[in-house]
Each structure stands twice: as structure tokens, then as C-alpha cells.
Amino acid sequence: MSAVLGDWSWVAGEQALSLEMRPGRFTEALSGHWTLTDFGHILDGLSLRRLVDALSGDEPSVTCGLQLADGRAVHLAGTFTRPGEARGLVLEAGTADAESRDPQSQLRAAYQPIYNLVTGRIDGFEALARWDGEDRRDRAQGPRTDDRALASNMLLQASEALARWQAETGRPDLFVQVNLTGRDLDDATLADLVAALVGGFSLPPGSLRLELTEQAALRNARQAQDMAVRLQAAGAALVLDDFGSGHSSFLWLADFPACGLKVDASLIARLQTPRVRIILESVTQLAHRLDMTVTAEGVETTALLPELRQSGFDFAQGFALGRPLSRDQTSQLLQAPAPALPG
Ligand code: G
Ligand code: MN
């Protein structure tokens, strides 16, 4: 997990950059209220130029690697909350720095829309990891690296993107869901990062969501439950992924505090089988009684949509509705008039 080193804010009208660093290696060097000129004295020359560009550009999000004059580096990530006012996080360098040689630098989150089956609108997205230059064959084999920074990088990109879409559309209810592994849950700094992202990007509580499979959580069930509670306290919501495939027990539903359930594509593909239909109708009823929403995954044909609605599903996601898109393509999709959901 990438360490959160502190928070920053920028007020263009006053040309004031404030950094509030947590206790650590960078506290003395960076903490305080700066003019850009003063701040420039502690940076290398190129870094100051990058920072000025990032703070004065048209981009709603700010992301910028900074090399200090003493050779150390940090990364600023954040977003404009209103014209001329930006805020965000100071992160350990390397995890999100596009210029670094870190293999993570080729990581790009792609966002697959999640449609509300009742209103027909897009209400959220699943963030999926994609590597620049990969072809379909690489992708089928899953992530090439098992880098520990994957989750933090995805969380950072997704939070930044979500803050931007919420601001662009005026819809604070939009959500984004990021996949976590069992190993991510072992990392004690995860909740800290989530709290910093929710605070740093001013995300409404519950709009940053974490998808977990039971298999991931079961690596250490007790610890996963503790972590789940801490993640919720940090402002994230939890979603149970791949439900109905592999190991997914009722204990999982009983014990894990989640706001939603995603039903595995293997079951959705068989929705038209009478026995599967009965099972799925019961699953949606059960989930609703437990205060959870239900998403159908892997919807590959719009012919399924009427039956998904009748079976009580709240959301649908899949190639028939939308492929994963870049952050900017997603902005455009959200700005276009919503096409009627087929079926
Ligand atoms: O395990 P999880 O549910 O997070 O898996 C998401 C994966 O499913 C992504 O890799 C995504 O590209 C893929 N996916 C999304 N929609 C569809 C679909 O309609 N059909 C198939 N086969 N895969 C899909
Ligand atoms: Mn998922």
C-alpha cells in the first residue's frame, strides 16, 4: 500500500499552497504554508514547473511527481473542489507517478458502467486494471505483476476519477467499485489510505466501494472482518463479488457488513434455466432483506434485462451494456444524454 504522507490544499487567489504532513521523514521539509516561489526553493526546477502546470491547467484533477532539491521525492494527487481551489494527498513517490520507471506506471484503470435497472441510468462503475500495450492474451492471464502497489494505485486513480465525475455531473450519488485481494486486506495501512482518499477527494461516504470475494476474505476471516469494519469507518462501502461461484456461503452473508452483492456471471448466463431463475429470485429477496443491493455481472445480451428486472436485480453490468472505458471516455459517456436501456 502506498503510504499517505500528508494532505495539501491550494488556493489560487491567494497563491497559497498548504501542506500538512503527518509525523515522518518529510514532516519538517514540507509542512507549512507556502507561496509557489518559496516552495520552488526546496524543489528541483522541473518539479516546480510541473506543479505550476498541474495547478493552473484545465484538468480537474491534479497529479504530479515532485523531486525535492535534496533528492527525495513525493507525489501530489488531488482534485479541484471548485474553481481555483484544489486539495488532495501527499503520497509516497513511485506508486502513482507516471514518469517513474515503476511497472505500475503503465497501469491504467478502466471503468465499466453499472446500470440501474429501474431508472436505466448509470449509477456507478467497476474499476478494472489494464496495462498499457497489453494485448488480449496478456489480459486473459490476469495481472502480470503481483505488485503490492496495485490496489493503492487503483484506489487512487478511481477516487480521483470519481471526484471528477461527481463534480462534472453534479451527481454525488455516483459510485466506483475497486477490487481488493486477500493480501490487500492484510495490509494495516489500507484503512488509512481509504480514509485519506475519501477525505482528500471529498467523496461522500459509501461512494468509494471495495469489491471482495469470499475467497479473498477467507484467507483470514477474523482479520478480514476487523478490516471490513475499519474500512467502513474510513468511509468506504463493501461489496461482495462473484457471489454464487466457488465458495460463497451463507455465513459470508451473515458476517460480512456489505452494501451490495454481485452475482457471478456463470449464474447470470443461466438465468433462463427455470431452476437457476428460482435460485436468483431467492438471492435477490434475501439480499434485499439484508439491506443489500444486487448487481448482475457479465450481462452479455440485452435480452436478459427484462428477466433481471423481474427477478429483482437492482443493477446490471456487462459487455452488452458497456465495455470498460478510460476516465475521459467515461466523462463523455456521463455527459451524453442517457440512452434508454434496452429491454
Ligand atoms: O471477478 P470480477 O467480477 O471482478 O471480474 C471482472 C472481469 O469481468 C473483468 O476482467 C471484465 O473485463 C470482465 N467482464 C466484464 N463484463 C463482462 C462480460 O459481459 N462478459 C465477460 N465474459 N467478461 C466480462
Ligand atoms: Mn469485481
Image (spheres, grey):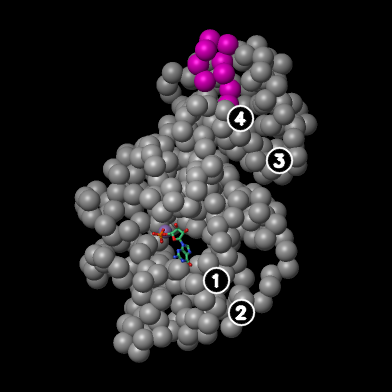
Which numbered disc, 2 or 3, marks the residue that appears first in the sequence?
3
Which residue lies most toward the right here? 13
Mark 4 and mark 2: span between their CA atoms? 41 Å
Which numbered disc, 1 or 3, marks the residue that appears first in the sequence?
3
Classify mark 2: helix, strand or loop. loop
Q: Which residue is mark 3?
A: 59
Q: Is residue 208 magenta?
A: no
> Do the residues bearing badges 2 and 3 touch, measured as CB atoms within 8 Å?
no
Q: Amino acid at mark 4?
A: Cys
Q: Which residue is mark 1?
A: 320
* Residue 41 versus residue 228 in the image, above or below: above
Mark 1 and mark 4: span between their CA atoms? 36 Å
* Residue 313 versus residue 208 in the image, above or below: below
Q: Residues within 10 Å of mark 4 (few under 14, many from 20)?
A: many
Please state which of the two labelled residues, at mark 1 or mark 3, is closer to the viewer: 1
Can residue 324 be seen? Answer: yes
> Do the residues bearing badges 3 and 4 touch, measured as CB atoms within 8 Å?
no
Which numbered disc, 1 or 4, marks the residue that appears first in the sequence?
4
Classify mark 4: helix, strand or loop. strand
Please state which of the two labelled residues, at mark 2 or mark 3, is closer to the viewer: 2
Residues in magenta, as a range:
64-73
Q: Residues within 10 Å of mark 1 (few under 14, many from 20)?
A: some
* Occupied quadrant, residue 171: bottom right
Mark 2 and mark 3: span between their CA atoms? 34 Å
Please state which of the two labelled residues, at mark 1 or mark 4, is closer to the viewer: 1
> Do the residues bearing badges 1 and 2 touch, measured as CB atoms within 8 Å?
yes
Q: Which residue is mark 4?
A: 64
